Image (tube, helix red, strand yellow):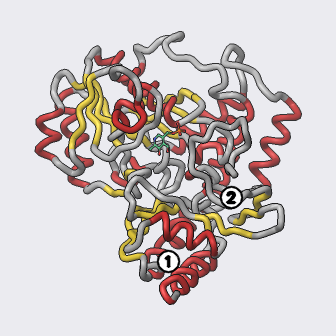
Amino acid sequence: MSKYNAHLQEVYPVLPFEPVKGDGVFLKDEKNKKVLDLYGGHAVTCLGYNHKKLITAITNQAKNLLFQSNAVIMKSRDDAATKLAEFSPKNLNKVFFVNSGAEANENAIRIALQLTGRKKIIAIENAFHGRTAAAGAVTWGSQKKWYGFPSTPMKVEFIPRNDIDSLKKAVDKDTAAVIIEPIQGVAGAYKFSNEFINSIQHQCKKNKTLLIFDEVQTGMGRLGVPFGADYFQVTPDLLTVAKSLAGGLPCGAVIMKEKIIKNLGAGSLGTTFGGGPLSSVAISAVIDTIIDDNLMDNINSVSKYLFSTCKIDPVIDIQGAGFLIGLKTKIPANVLRDKLLKKNIMTGTSSDPNILRLLPPYILEKSHIEILSSALKEINNE
Ligand SMILES: Cc1ncc(COP(=O)(O)O)c(C=O)c1O
């Protein structure tokens, strides 16, 4: 029997677990089986489940005003934009809200092409930026797998990871933007060298090319600092964010340097749902909680504990930073994911068949890491 009902198109392989409730870092099924969630619904549930401040903010807003569009002034949207700009690197101070990571990247790429009048985008091998036309075009391997359009909306050139010579050759006066995830998420928490990130910034400045950081997965505190831009101390011209942004409601944003987008007037960008009141109050609650509860300090100390205690066979190495973690596995990552799920721990795979991905909620504690290390020891002894 299919795991799907008759009407839902099967586009994802699904895990044999159906959560109906969540509390803190745990999910429960109908029979009350408790599963430790180290994957956070693809990096979305950054405050875990049933978080009082987030749920209260959403519930109150839903009762007062469920929706209104960008055609009216809305304090909740203004507040969210202010908090997000203040949370972002200095100079990134203009926010355009959308609904997803792909949509944020689609807009960032369009803005770069429009503002520069150039035709080419440079992307990095193994990158993932989403499944829409422009975001798919800069996603490595998508053309073969699922891109599906007859042509890309702009010229795209991929360069190998950390290859500074290729970078220098590729970025030229026809390059509108370089797009990069500071740490590649779907690829398995792959961290670039500082030299590579710095060279990208240098080449962009030299050629008046815009730098886009796709922080859909790395952003919102996940690396133990607000953004990958802070982690590498490089400020891009445009930064995209989604996933953890509203802690579980669908939303995304393009955060831009005011200086570069001043020529982009009213009417250049648009969305119906982006910046709606529900996501706006959720964004504010997420940012307030990350700051007030010192969640980035928690990420740093719990992540350090994981890196030092979880290299247990079949895990042979650990990469990434903060709570964007890749466990390199001796056995196929999907086999380890299934074994861990049998021990009531949810993890995720990546595009690297030997890297298991962890994207846990920011409230995870050291005791939860011990649940993982014990499970790995048991698996090693089986
Ligand atoms: C780095 C990155 N960019 C963009 C996306 C696409 O985001 P969405 O699925 O919200 O469109 C993802 C999704 O995994 C991502 O990891």
Q: Is residue 178 above or below residue 219?
A: above
Toward which corner of the image does residue 170 lie, by quadrant? top left
- The answer to whether residue 212 is seen in the rendering is no
* Distance (Cα) linking label 1 and label 2: 19 Å
Q: To which residue does mark 1 refer?
A: 305
Q: Which of the two discs, 1 and 2, labels the residue nearer the N terminus?
A: 2
Query: Looking at this view, is 159 or 264 the one in front?
Result: 159
Residue 7 at x, y = what percent? Answer: 72, 35
Query: Which amino acid does the dot numbered 1 rest on?
Result: Tyr
Residue with the most extreme front position: 1
Residue located 69% across and 60% down the image: 17
In the picture, measured across the screen, residue 3 lies left or right of residue 53, that is left
Q: Residues within 10 Å of mark 1 (few under 14, many from 20)?
A: some
Query: Which amino acid does the dot numbered 2 rest on?
Result: Gly
In the picture, measured across the screen, residue 214 lies left or right of residue 196, that is right
In the picture, measured across the screen, residue 101 lies left or right of residue 287, that is left
Residue located 39% across and 60% down the image: 353
Residue 163 at x, y = what percent? Answer: 17, 48
Q: Residues within 10 Å of mark 2 (few under 14, many from 20)?
A: many
Residue 262 at x, y = what percent? Answer: 42, 18
- The answer to whether residue 46 is seen in the rendering is yes
Query: Looking at this view, is 49 or 82 the one in front?
Result: 49
Q: To which residue does mark 2 refer?
A: 48
